[in-house]
Structures are given as structure tokens and as C-alpha cells.
Image: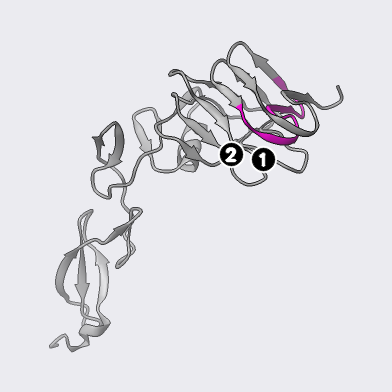
Amino acid sequence: CDHSGKSNEIFSPVDDTNHSLNCSVCGAEVSQDVHSLDNGICKACGFGCSHGTYVTENGTIKCAVCPVRMVAQVGDAYYPTLGEAVTAASAIEGSTLTLLADVKGAIAVPSRSTFTLDLNGKTLYGTGSNSAITVNTSSTLTMKSSVAGGKVTGCNSASLAGTVKVYGTFNLESGAITGNKADLGGGVNIQEGTFKMTGGEITDNEVRSYGGAVYMVGV
């Protein structure tokens, strides 16, 4: 084969750095080229970076290959998205999810999961009309900020939700729930379960119905 089907080359991942260009006629490797990564995904071959090694630049932890910014840490592992970090923390009883950067998103603690959210001086921005944090039945979330300034803010929840919606157990040790809007419970909305506050702040939240700071169903 003279690999005349060059215009129909097939890209195949080789390793974390390169992909091969294969002839579409015989399948033979014609050449290799480096991945063209966009947010950790190669636009040519679809390779997904494993984010296995890291570098620190100006206080920001990044993947040494991509380099995608890491936004959270659980144990010794770093994660580029909040969702991946929540999945990892939920699978490890008593683990701590530490924010490494300000991040926009939502945290839903699955039933029968227990972990700690350390804001680490960073900001969790709520998004959309859902609660910023949902603690589901038979789950426990402890929120703290080991570095001053950590907060949950920017939530504009609807459909009777609050900024932190509780069906299980929510412990607030430090950090702030501030600058949010909700229908019921500008800070915490207790549908059922337990809310224990030993520190931290719930301030400057707005509600369209009841419970500027805390709302409890039936009370």
C-alpha cells in the first residue's frame, strides 16, 4: 500500500503525549504527532488525559500534561471538576474534599455518604435554580474553611429549595453562607434530618417566602 488514502487518515492514541496517524486503507502507521489537547481531550484522536502528574504554578495546581487546572483535592488525588471530586469523596467514608480554587457548581451528597467539605478560603458559587449543596437522606456533610474567607454564595434557588438543602445531616463548623437568594431558607433549608451549627456564618441572604437564614419544614 502506498498509503494514498492520506486524506482519510485514522488517528489513534499512542501514549499521554502522542497519537499515530494510520492509513485508512491498510491501517499501517504513517507517522506520529503530539496531542492537540483542549480541556484535557485531544481534538484529533479523542484521547482523554489521565491527569496523573501535577505541577504548581503561582499557587495553582495544574496537570503536567494538559495542563488543566485542578479545582479540588480528595486525599492525595486532584480533580479538574467539582463533580469528579464529589464522586471520589462520596466513595471514601470520612474523607475531606478540599477546594483548591473558586468554583461554580453544585454539590449533591449521595445517600449513605459521609465527608467533609473544606472551603479552604475559596468560594463555591451556586448555579442555576438548584441548591448549591444538597445533603441527601442518610448522608452527612460537614462544612468548614481551614483558611479564612471560604464561602458559599451566588445561589438563586427556586422550587422551594434553599442554598443548602438538608434531608440528612449538615454540620456547619466554619466558613460562610452569604449573599444567596432562595424561596425558603436563604441559608439552610431543612426538609428533614439535622442541622448543627458550631461555627461559621449565615448572613445577608434573601428569601421570597420564609427563613432568611434557616427554614425548617413544619416549624
Residue closest to the eye, 99 or 23: 99
Give the x, y percent position of residue 94.
50, 22
| Residue 71 versus residue 93 in the image, above or below | below
- Please give the label number shown on residue 67: none
Q: Which residue is mark 1?
A: 156
Q: Tell me if I can see residue 162 in this picture.
A: yes
Figure quadrant of residue 207: top right
Name the secondary structure under disc 1.
loop
For the C terminus, the quadrant is: top right
Residue closest to the eye, 177 or 89: 177
Q: Report, in whole angstroms, how far the alpha carbon at label 2 lies from the one at label 1.
A: 7 Å
Which residue is pictured at 64% across the width and 14% down the height? 197
Give the x, y percent position of residue 80.
39, 43
Q: Amino acid at mark 2?
A: Gly
Instruction: Kindly indicate whether the residue at mark 1 contacts the one at mark 2 (C-beta within 8 angstroms).
Output: yes
Q: Residues within 10 Å of mark 1 (few under 14, many from 20)?
A: many
Q: Specify whether residue 181 is painted magenta.
A: yes
| Residue 71 versus residue 217 in the image, above or below | below
Give the x, y percent position of residue 131.
65, 38
Q: Amino acid at mark 1?
A: Asn
Q: Tell me if I can see residue 166 in this picture.
A: no
- Please give the label number shown on residue 126: 2
Which residue is pictured at 79% across the width and 24% down the height? 216
| Extent of the magenta region | 178-194
